[in-house]
């Protein structure tokens, strides 16, 4: 069992690595910067509001032990924190390998994980929902969103309200970034402490088989985590386009959240409230999948479910690559022109007590074509407990499938281990609370 001192060392060391410096707030934001409380609480909130009812530190530590089933011992918190300091091996941008005649061993997936395994018939595709009638919700749009989230966890949206000119400008800015000289991109090389910046791996397991993709990860909300200096300076229009895109897609997420809430029989704002109201978090990951000498042996992104609330994916307008697992079979998504792909993340699965499903997905790559996609992660406020919405447990026989947990706690594991199918949220499911 971990001692208090190991936990507090953990907190202190996190404090030293996560300082957000003085970040200007771009707009009114109710979620204040943590100047009045230790910065460490941003990542691992050992503070009163997350304590269990008896409020003791012991109770909190045992809560962490229960909630983090991937740990054999809570003392491993220290170990995780150490792992997240730096990458375990030098990071090689995939783009710098893409002209090689052979695929380096580090990217060769074991036979059971290769893209050809479990491929589906082409006829199936994820549902398409026309959002023109949101937020009013007429025309069956709530039912369509809700059905898609229950049965697929994925859907495409058309008439989503985000300016197509903005989407084009935003996408081209980021394509421009990935085509800059490597030296310019490396100025933003990231570390596993926060993942912000230009990176080429997820997870810090030494010797892991890697994915064939580079990315750029940034914080958009809360505003005290947003730092333009950590965003690319070039191309010149990138920061402005990303700001505008963030504002618009956030609005879209809020509309979709209403539909999700109504689809569960809740008040329109209930899920948003449970997620933290106006204090939600937003991160953006721009994925760049270079040409691959052996696409049959590699994956651009290993199977995973998204850890957060909702993901709005802007897929490449020319090249497919996303596959969704449906009934054990991998189905290739064929993005419609000007559509977004939306999927349920683990936190919405938890809030909805598994009425809505976060579904495994992965990315395949190509020999002749590179691919760019942008994942907009709409997340809960990171320091509040996220558990099944109580109203959903009112009916007899409805047991809570998950104990409340903060997104900060949850994310720590994802960051260490990288993509792991659905093992992370499923491991919490196994901990159904007895007697509820
Ligand atoms: C992700 C993701 C899919 C894609 O970034 O989490 O699933 O098509 N991306 O790049
Ligand atoms: Ni994903």
Image: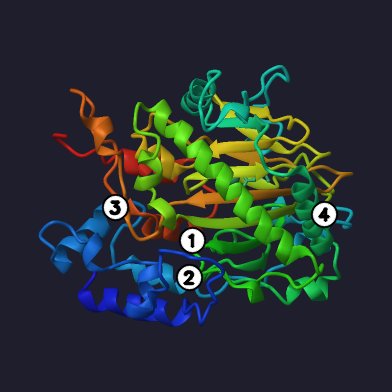
In the displayed structure, does residue 129 sit left or right of residue 385? Answer: right
Q: Would you say the beta carbon of the disc 1 residue lies within 8 angstroms of ligand 1? A: no
Q: Secondary structure at mark 4?
A: helix
Q: Where is residue 141 drawn, in percent x and y?
A: 54, 23
Instruction: Tell me how far mark 1 sits from mark 4, CA to CA.
Output: 31 Å
Q: Where is residue 238 drawn, in percent x and y?
A: 76, 64
Instruction: Tell me how far mark 3 sits from mark 4, CA to CA.
Output: 42 Å
Image region (quadrant) for ligand 1: top right
Q: Secondary structure at mark 1?
A: helix
For disc 3, the marked residue is: 67
Q: Would you say the beta carbon of the disc 3 residue lies within 8 angstroms of ligand 2? A: no
* Mark found first going from the N terminus, 1 or 3: 3
Q: Which mark is residue 83?
A: 2
Q: Is residue 356 above or below residue 408?
A: above
Q: Which mark is residue 416?
A: 1
Which of the two residues, 397 or 136, is positioned nearer the viewer here?
136
Are dots 2 and 3 in contact, CB under 8 Å? Answer: no
Q: Which mark is residue 16?
A: none
Q: Is residue 76 above or below residue 376?
A: below
For disc 4, the marked residue is: 172
* Mark found first going from the N terminus, 2 or 4: 2
The quadrant in which the C terminus is found is top left
The quadrant in which the N terminus is found is bottom left
Instruction: Tell me how far mark 1 sits from mark 2, CA to CA.
Output: 7 Å
Give neighbour class at mark 4: few <14, some 14-19, many 20+ (Cα, 10 Å): some
Q: Secondary structure at mark 3?
A: helix
Question: Measuring 40% from the left and 60% from the top, which residue is drawn there?
Answer: 408
Give neighbour class at mark 1: few <14, some 14-19, many 20+ (Cα, 10 Å): some
Q: Where is residue 104 drawn, in percent x and y?
A: 77, 56
Q: Secondary structure at mark 2?
A: helix
């Amino acid at each position: 069992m971990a001692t208090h001192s190991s936990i507090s060392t953990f907190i202190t060391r996190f404090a030293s690595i996560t300082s957000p410096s003085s970040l200007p707030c771009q707009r009114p934001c109710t979620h204040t910067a943590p100047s009045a409380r230790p910065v460490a609480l941003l990542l691992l909130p050992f503070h009163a509001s997350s304590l269990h009812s008896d409020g003791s530190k012991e109770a909190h530590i045992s809560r962490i032990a229960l909630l983090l089933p991937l740990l054999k011992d809570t003392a491993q918190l220290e170990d995780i924190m150490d792992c997240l300091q730096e990458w375990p091996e030098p990071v090689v941008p995939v783009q710098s390998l893409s002209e090689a005649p052979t695929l380096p061993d580090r990217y060769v997936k074991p036979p059971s994980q290769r893209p050809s395994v479990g491929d589906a018939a082409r006829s199936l595709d994820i549902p398409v929902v026309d959002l023109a009638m949101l937020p009013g919700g007429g025309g069956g749009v709530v039912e369509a969103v809700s059905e898609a989230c229950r049965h697929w966890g994925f859907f495409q949206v058309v008439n989503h309200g985000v300016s197509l000119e903005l989407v084009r400008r935003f996408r081209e800015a980021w394509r421009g970034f990935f085509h800059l000289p490597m030296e310019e991109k490396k100025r933003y090389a990231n570390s596993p402490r926060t993942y912000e910046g230009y990176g080429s791996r997820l997870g810090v397991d030494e010797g892991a088989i890697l994915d064939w993709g580079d990315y750029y990860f940034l914080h958009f909300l809360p505003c005290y985590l947003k730092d333009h200096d950590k965003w690319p300076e070039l191309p010149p229009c990138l920061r402005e386009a990303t700001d505008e895109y963030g504002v618009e897609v956030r609005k879209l997420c809020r509309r979709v959240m209403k539909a999700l809430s109504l689809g569960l029989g809740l008040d329109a704002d209930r899920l948003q409230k449970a997620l933290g109201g106006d204090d939600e978090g937003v991160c953006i990951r721009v994925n760049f999948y270079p040409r691959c000498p052996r696409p049959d042996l590699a994956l651009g992104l290993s199977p995973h479910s998204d850890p957060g609330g909702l993901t709005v994916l802007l897929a490449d307008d020319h090249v497919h690559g996303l596959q969704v697992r449906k009934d054990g079979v991998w189905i290739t998504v064929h993005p419609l022109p000007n559509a977004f792909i939306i999927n349920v993340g683990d936190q919405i699965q938890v809030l909805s007590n598994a009425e809505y499903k976060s579904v495994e997905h992965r990315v395949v790559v190509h020999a002749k074509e590179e691919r760019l996609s942008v994942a907009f992660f709409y997340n809960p406020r990171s320091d509040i407990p996220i558990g099944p919405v109580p109203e959903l447990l009112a009916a007899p026989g409805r047991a809570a499938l998950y104990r409340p947990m903060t997104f900060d706690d949850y994310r720590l594991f994802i960051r260490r281990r990288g993509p792991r199918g659905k093992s992370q949220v499923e491991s919490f499911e196994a901990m159904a609370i007895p007697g509820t």
